[in-house]
Image: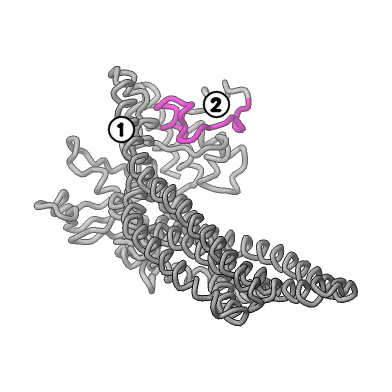
Amino acid sequence: MLIKVLKTYLSPYRKNVAIVMALLLIQSITNLYLPTLNADLINNGVAKGDVGYIWKIGAIMLAASALILGASVLLAYLSSKVSMAFGRDLRGGVFSAVEGFSARELNQFGAPSLITRNTNDVQQVQMVLFMGLTMMLGAPITGIGSVIMALRTNVKLSGLLLIAVPIMGVLIWSLLRRIVPLFRVMQIKIDRLNLVLREQIGGVRVIRAFVKTRFEEARFAETSEDLMQTTLGVTRTFAVMFPVLMLILNLSSVAVIWFGGKLVDSGEMPIGNLTAFLAYIMQILSSVMMAVMMSLMIPRAAASAERIQEVLDTPSSVIDSPNPKSPAGRTGILEFKDVEFRYPGAEHPVLSEISFTAHPGQVTAIVGSTGSGKSTLLNLIPRFIDVTGGAVYLDGLEVQEQSLEAIWSDIGLVPQRSFLFGGTIAENLRYGDAHATDEQLWAALEIAQATDFVKELPDLLESRVAQGGTNFSGGQRQRLSIARAIVKNPRLYILDDSFSALDYTTDSNLRAALARESQN
C-alpha cells in the first residue's frame, strides 16, 4: 500500500525527485572519493614532506567538501519541498474522498478515525518520504561503494566486514519481527484515544451534570495508559537497538585500528590507506544504521498508508450519475413512490411503502414517534443515503438520475442538530449565498426571528461564532441555521425537527413568516 500511495501522489513531482536522486549520486560519489584523497595526501604528501602536494590535494578536498555542502543544502530543500507538497496532496485526496462519503461510510470509519488518518497517518508517510529522499536512497550507494573502495584499499582488512555486517543484519531482523506488529496497534490506539477525547469535550456538560468527571478522567487515563504501554514497547526496542549498533560500530573501528596497525607496522599497508579504510568502514556501518532507521520507520508508514488507502479505496454508497439528466420543467413537485429503506445488516426496513406528493407552496409534515425514520426519510431527498426500494422524484425526474450538485442547489437544509461553523454570523449566513448583501442577511434573520438577539451583539453580523456555535443557545443556533437556509433562497426547504428548542411564540411567528416567504 505504501508503494501505491507514493506512486500515485509523487507522480506530479517526478522532475524534482530525479534532481534529488542526481544530487544524492553526486553527494555519495564525492563522499566516497574523500577518504582516497586523504590517503593520497598522507602517503605522498605528509609522509614525503611534499608541501606543494599537500596544498594541491588539500585544495581538491576543500572543493569536494564544498560540492558536498552545496548538494546537501539543495538536496534538503528539494526533499522538503517534495515531501510537503506530497503531504498536502495526500491530505487533499483523503479529504475529497471523505467529502464524497454517504452517512453509511462516515459511520463505518467514525470521525475520530478519519481525523487520525488525515493527520497522523499522512504525517507518518510524509516523514518516511522525506527521510527516504535524504537518507535511504543514498545509503545503498554509499554502502556498496564503500565496500568496493574498502576492498580496493586492503583485502585482508575487508574480512572484518564479514563479521560486523551479518551480526548487524541478524540484530535488525530480530528487532523488526518484534516491532512491526506494534505500529498497527499504535495507530488503532491513537484512534481510540481521539474518540474518548472527542466524546469528553463534546459531552462535557453531560459529564458535569451526572457528576462523572472523575469517571471520565479515569477512562481517559486508562486509554492513554494503554497507548503509552504500546509506545513503550516500541521505544524499549529502540533503546536496546541503537546502543548495540553503536557498540558494533565502535568494536569494528577498534578491530580495524588493531589489525591495520599490525599491517602498517609490517610494511604491508601505508598509513594513509589505514585511515581511508577506517573511513570506509564508518561509511559502511553508517549506511547500515541509516537502513535500520528506515526499516523501523517504513513499517509504521506502511500501516498508515494501508489505513489511508482504505479510505481512498472505499466507494461511496451514493454515486453521482455519470450522465445526469435535467428535468423537463421546474415543477417543484417532490414525490415518493413506494419508497423502502433498509440499513445494512438490518432484518427489517426502517421505511416501507412510503408514498406521498409535496407541491410548491405547500407544507408537508412528516409525523412519527422517536426512531420511526423521519430523519432517514428526509435524508433520502438530497441523497445523503439512497433508497433500497421504490423511487424519489423531484420535478418529475428520479433523483438518482439527476446531478447531486443540482439537487443540493435546490434544497435548503436545516438538520436536526443545528451546526454553525467557526467564524462570524455573516460568514455562516453567506454559506447559503456567498454574494448575499447585508440587507438580504438581515431579511433572512427577520424571517428566522433572530434579529432581536443578533442586534444585541456588539459586532452585529460580524460577531464571532465559536466552532459548532457553542457560544449560542440551542434556540439561537436553530434560528441562525434556518436563516442560513433562507439566504440560499432554495426551491425546497427541509426542516428536520428544527423548531424543537424554540418557545411557543417564536415558533409560531417563525412558521408564519416562513410560510409567507415560501409562497414567494
| Coordinates of residue 368 in the picture (x, y in percent) | 18, 38
In the figure, 129 relative to 478: above or below?
below
In the figure, 62 relative to 301: above or below?
below
What's the mark number on residue 107? Answer: none
Residue shown at the point (28%, 19%) measured from the top left: 210
Callout 1 amino acid: Glu
Q: What stretch is highlighted in magenta?
A: 459-480
Q: Do the residues labelled 1 and 2 touch (CB within 8 Å)?
A: no
Residue shown at the point (46%, 62%) measured from the top left: 292
Callout 2 amino acid: Val
Which residue was labeled with disc 2?
Answer: 454
In the figure, 124 relative to 210: above or below?
below
388, 28: nearer the viewer: 28
| Coordinates of residue 95 in the picture (x, y in percent) | 45, 56
Q: In which quarter of the image is the N terminus?
A: bottom left
**Quarter of image, res 436:** top right
Do we see residue 266 in this rendering? Answer: yes
Cα distance between the residues tagged 1 and 2: 44 Å
How crowded pointer 1 is (Cα within 10 Å; few <14, some 14-19, many 20+) is rated as few
Check if residue 264 falls in the magenta segment. no
Which residue was labeled with disc 1?
Answer: 222
Check if residue 461 falls in the magenta segment. yes
Residue 256 located left or right of residue 179? right
